[in-house]
Amino acid sequence: MLQHLRVQNFAIISDLSLDFAPGLNVFSGETGAGKSIVIEALGFVLGARGDVDAIKDGAEKMTVSAVFSSADLPEELRREYQIAGDVFTLKRELDRKGKSKAAADGHPVTVSALARLGRALVDFHGQHDHQSLLHSSVHLMLLDKFAGHENLVQKTETAYRQRQAAQAKLDAARMSAQEKEQLLDMSQYQLKEIEDINPSADEDFQLEQTLPKMKHAGRLLEMAQEAYYELYEAEDAASSRTAKALREVQNMAALDENLTNLAQDLNSALLTLEDAASTLASYKDDINLEPDALDRMLLRHEKIKRLKAKYGPEISDVLNTARALREKIDQLQHGEEHEQELLKELEQSQKQLLKLSGELHEKRMSAARRLSARITEEIRPLGFNAVKFSVAVEMDEENPGPTGADKVEFLFSPNPGQALRPLKNIASGGEISRVMLGLKTVLAPTVPVMVFDEVDAGIGGETGHLVGQKLHAAAQGRQVLCVTHLAQVAAQADQNFHVSKKASKTATEVSISALQPPELAAEIARMLGGGGKNSAAFSHAQELLKDAQRL
């Protein structure tokens, strides 16, 4: 569960802290008030792309931290990221120079690590996901996620890559001498460019951790020497004074045993001071004041940045490119000698790809029947009394790809007597929203937090009431965060937040407050069209809250 979120200098938020409840948490407010900014901030701290333009005007950096229950993380992730307590904090900063810092429970991590943790914690559904549901490639991904056969999908992709590599080797062997020479020269040049620098994994991350110490080496050495002197070398050094006090208290304890614990505390303090002095001694001895050391490190950092820009974006991509180039060079130099072997390798890899694609097709057909039934069951109560939903799987054996040989299409019929047709050809915006809600409910049962940014777009009335009930049901046993403009959805929440925006001549600021019962009815009434306590809107708001058992 997401327990706490703090957002600083993000977009039009200066400093905002929010505590979340279990169940359904709803954000409401006027159009344009900034309801989605909190969702964007949560995405940022969970590894989404950061944009320096999102830093609040006048600030040098933006910071977002989120506190989660550690019980929500798989055991292997808790071990990997040294998370031991009942809760842990993820934190991310981005400054105007584009430099990002991230931490998991106080330990520095990469942004990709935040994204990995985020995928285990939160499932996001933003407004753009409505449109993504119209693409068949997304249908294939969702079906595979539901089926849970990731290992087979990975094996199929590996087989496809092997088939492609075998084809490339054969093509290289059959290439003209001039083409081969040109490609060989280019590949050797690129490989030499990488090998001359020879980066190691995560070297850029290590350099970014070390450079600040190098830049301030002189000052750090001066302060470390002074601290060491005060602790250990001065005539009245802290350790010396503590040792004298310890001897006196030990003598006192020999006469009064009530002072034994105090003597033990002083002894521990002395050991701690000696350990600190030893650490400072090692630290100052390790500081490198060699004049050229910083220049060499800065030059090294710049070279690695250029490599990443050309072959990255990450060092792992650069190293993978080097491996691929070595293989290509070997193929170009020795391909003709092994053409028959290459033909055999291509035939075997094609056979393996077709075999795995066939296995994947059978599993997808079975999963498609189950998913069709589950989605129909989920969306029928959302105003689709005669809905038909089907997942069509069609295999093209002649053209297998990295995901196998299947094309997947979601078919949909919202009305009686209407034939099943592709979802992209028939569904309205409101229907897409409800289908997506059904999909998310089915496909994300193990994710502790689900986020919906205006999942109720394009709907209202009784259907909005049904969607609110579905969101409340989906929040049982997990946590749901939802941005909404519908009173029927807001009334079903376990915790409501009101978002408002204040503008002056020089600045705009977002304010978010948790609503208590007296304020909640007024907010629901505002969403229904406004009016005071004696208005029809206020009476309707109370009815909605009573129906949701919140009054």
Image (cartoon, rainbow, N blue to C red):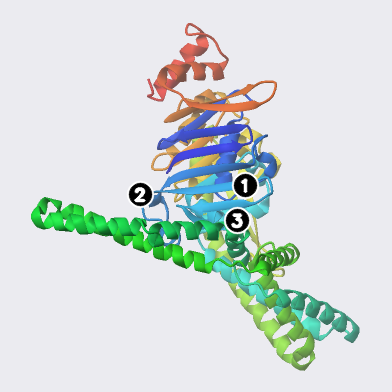
Name the quarter where the C terminus is drawn: top left
In this image, 179 relative to 99: left or right?
right
Q: Secondary structure at mark 3?
A: helix
Q: Which kind of residue does numbered mark 1 sit on?
A: Leu
Image coordinates for residue 373, horizontal then vertical, percent: 50, 48
In this image, 328 relative to 478: left or right?
right
Q: Residue at x 61, y 36 (%)?
A: 431
Residue 524 versus residue 369: which sits nearer the camera? 524
Farthest residue in the front direction? Answer: 235
Image coordinates for residue 60, horizontal then vertical, percent: 64, 41
Q: Residue at x 41, y 35 (%)?
A: 21
* Residue 531 visible (yes or no): yes
Q: Which kind of residue does numbered mark 3 sit on?
A: Met
Q: Which mark is residue 86?
A: 2
Query: Circle 3: is it few (<14), some (14-19), or many (20+) Cα within 10 Å?
Result: few
Query: Circle 2: is it few (<14), some (14-19), or many (20+) Cα within 10 Å?
Result: few
Q: Which residue is mark 1?
A: 94
Q: Which kind of residue does numbered mark 2 sit on?
A: Asp
Q: Earlier in the sequence, mark 2 or mark 1?
A: 2
Q: Which residue is mark 3?
A: 141
Residue 142 versus residue 296: which sits nearer the camera? 296
Q: Earlier in the sequence, mark 3 or mark 1?
A: 1
Residue 152 versus residue 186: which sits nearer the camera? 186
Image coordinates for residue 374, horizontal then vertical, percent: 49, 47
Whether 306 is drawn above or below 468: the answer is: below
Whether 220 is drawn above or below 544: the answer is: below
Residue 60 versus residue 517: which sits nearer the camera? 60
Please report contact status of discs 2 and 1: CB closer than 8 Å, yes or no. Answer: no
Please report contact status of discs 3 and 1: CB closer than 8 Å, yes or no. Answer: no
Q: CA distance from mark 3 to mark 1?
A: 32 Å
